[in-house]
Image (cartoon, grey):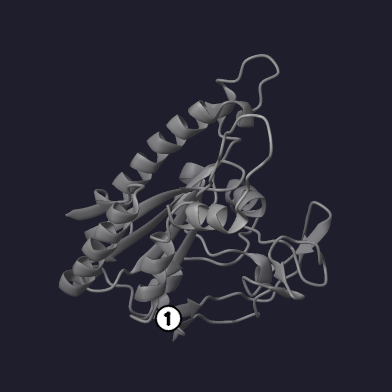
Amino acid sequence: MNKSELNGSPHNMQQNYQDAMAMVRKFGKPDLFLTFTCNPSWFEVLNCMEGVQRPEDRPDIIIRVFNMKLKELLEDICKHGIFGTVLTYIYVIEFQKRGLPHAHILPTLDSESKIRTEDDIDKFVSAELPDPCTDLRLFQIVTKCMVHGPCGTINMNSPCMRDGQCCKSFPKQFKDDTEENVNGYPIYRRRATEPVQVGKYSIDNRWVVPYNPWLLKKFNAHINVEVCASVKSVKYLYKYVYKGHDAASVKIQKEGALDHDEILSYVEGRFK
């Protein structure tokens, strides 16, 4: 099994990108795109808080717990084969603006494990609210971790809104059956059902982010699972995961006139 892991410098990012494309040439396109986000409400994190501490006060604990859970997730995918036999994979760890880590994982499956049909997609990925009567725990995790927004006319102040439209294209359309290979990704089954109350909003299947039920119940976190239906998605995915980290430029000088070159500061912060 091959793997690639991102390191911080531009040289390493470029090298890892080239390694990833070599994997595509030898083993084919990635079959899945998983995003695993840290949950600061994990009991392993909360149990380590002392006094009035909150998770955001202890990034050291958050990172250690996330790292342990990420290793377990990778074992489930790559060694235990929950999606089938994995030939090769890459993953990249990023940090959100709030400081929470998340990982993008791209596994490539062998020919017998390929996700080829609508039934294969439905077997591994769901984009619907589970029935609270038959699986209350999964329903609680989905409504807490896997509901987008809401945005649009319901909430125009949502961070995903760009020029009056959701940049993630939510709400999705209701769909009785999954359709494969639409612009590189499937359109997942989202049957029309009665909406449920989540906080102050009424939510239906149009707002659910695609997920794998087994992984969600085990890790109790935001785990977006997407099927890569077409080779068209390869370039976008690898450009996305290897886009690099944020940079900042800081200058310290003695008291006196501030010599501030705004253009130079931008260039140094952007390219160094």
Res 156 seen here: yes
Identify the residue at image location x=60%, y=66%. Answer: 128
- Find residue 201 and report its horizontal and vertical position in percent: 81, 59
Q: Which residue is mark 1?
A: 184
- Find residue 122 and report its horizontal and vertical position in percent: 45, 71
Decide: is 153 above or below 66.
Answer: below
Question: Identity of the amino acid at label 1?
Answer: Gly
The image quadrant that residue 81 belongs to is bottom left
- Find residue 99 and report its horizontal and vertical position in percent: 57, 41
Give left or right: position of 35 versus 232.
Answer: right
- Find residue 46 and report its horizontal and vertical position in percent: 59, 26
The image quadrant that residue 107 belongs to is bottom left
Q: Return the residue nearer the eye: 35 or 100.
A: 100
Farthest residue to the top: give it. Answer: 51
Identify the residue at image location x=57%, y=21%. Answer: 47
Image quadrant in which the N terminus is located:
bottom left
Identify the residue at image location x=47%, y=34%. Answer: 63
Say which element carries label 1: loop
Identify the residue at image location x=39%, y=76%. Answer: 233
Give the tally of numbered discs: 1
Q: Return the residue nearer the eye: 97 or 45.
A: 97
Res 110 seen here: no
Give left or right: position of 270 versus 77.
Answer: right
Q: Return the residue nearer the eye: 161 or 262.
A: 262
Q: Residues within 10 Å of mark 1 (few under 14, many from 20)?
A: some
Give left or right: position of 127 versus 110.
Answer: right
